[in-house]
Structures are given as structure tokens and as C-alpha cells.
Image (cartoon, rainbow, N blue to C red):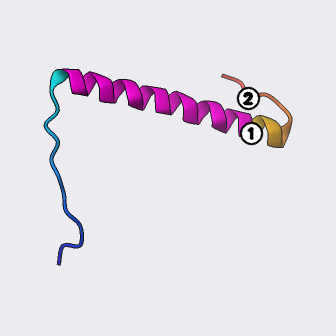
Amino acid sequence: MRTAYQYKLRPKKEQIATILLWLELLRRQYNYRLGERFFVVGRKPLSG
């Protein structure tokens, strides 16, 4: 029994570019905040 619907996206080239940009920005934000958390908890900067 299927409990969720599955949708297939067919974005246009401009939409693909926008989606990829958003994913990149979200990845950077996540990694920045993760680094902040480690810095505050450990009181030492992360290398890299």
C-alpha cells in the first residue's frame, strides 16, 4: 500500500539554475552554522 504520492519534476533550464543556486546557498549556510556551533561548544576554530 502506497502511503505517499510521488511527483516527477520537469523544471525548465532557468528553474534548474535557480534550484541549484538555492541548494548551494543552503549548503553554505548549513556548514557556516555548523562551524559556529562547533566553535562555541569547543571554543576552538575548525580548520578548513
**What amino acid is found at the position of numbered circle 2 in the picture?**
Leu
Q: Residue at x 53, y 28 (%)?
A: 28
Q: CB atoms at circles 1 and 2 under 8 Å apart? A: yes
Q: Residue at x 49, y 32 (%)?
A: 27
User: Where's residue 48, x and y in %?
Assistant: 66, 22
Q: Is residue 6 left or right of residue 35?
A: left
Residue 26 in magenta stretch = yes
Decide whether the magenta segment is chiefly helix, strand or loop. helix
- Which residue lies at the image location 78% right of the left edge and 35% below the top edge? 39
Q: Position of residue 20 (x, y in %)?
A: 33, 27
Where is residue 46 shown, x and y percent of the image?
Answer: 73, 29
First along the sequence among labels 1 and 2: 1
Q: Residue 44 is drawn in which quadrant?
A: top right
Residue farthest bottom in this picture:
1
The residue under label 1 is: 38
Over which residues does the magenta segment extend? 14-37
Label 2 sits on residue: 46
Q: Quadrant of residue 33?
A: top right
Q: Residue at x 23, y 73 (%)?
A: 3
Give the answer, above or below, for where 38 lies relative to 25. Answer: below
